[in-house]
Image (tube, rainbow, N blue to C red):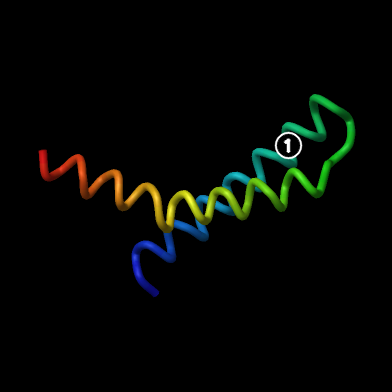
Amino acid sequence: MSKRTKDGIISALVFAVVAILFGYFIYGEIKWSAVIGLMIGGFISWYFIIPKVNKLGRRE
């Protein structure tokens, strides 16, 4: 498994855990649509966007 894939999966899981805990303790219920959305967004951001930003930052 590549580093990008591993980072994407780890960030998706972290985002999901944070969304579950935040929803449970703040709102008293878990909003699964928010959890799924944050998982997808976390994976996309750490698989596509963050490596591109890091690559551009190293060049300058």
Q: Is residue 32 left or right of residue 39?
A: right
Residue 41, percent from left and from top: 58, 49
Residue 44, percent from left and from top: 50, 55
**Tally of numbered discs:** 1
**Extreme residue in the right direction:** 28
Comparing 40 with 29, the one in front is 40
Helix, strand or loop at label 1? It is: helix
Residue 47, percent from left and from top: 43, 58
Amino acid type assigned to the residue bearing label 1 in the image: Leu
Residue 27, percent from left and from top: 85, 27
Q: Please report the residue visible at 65 percent of the width from the left and 39 percent of the height from the top.
A: 18
Give neighbour class at mark 1: few <14, some 14-19, many 20+ (Cα, 10 Å): some
Q: Is residue 13 left or right of residue 46?
A: right
Q: Please report the residue visible at 68 percent of the width from the left and 49 percent of the height from the top.
A: 37
**Extreme residue in the left direction:** 60
Q: Is residue 16 left or right of residue 8?
A: right
Residue indicated by mark 1: 21
**Extreme residue in the top direction:** 26
Where the C terminus falls, by quadrant? top left
**Extreme residue in the bottom direction:** 1
Q: Please report the residue visible at 36 percent of the width from the left and 47 percent of the height from the top.
A: 50
Vertical comparison of 24 with 15: above or below: above
Where the N terminus falls, by quadrant? bottom left
Comparing 1 with 45, the one in front is 45
Vertical comparison of 21 with 40: above or below: above
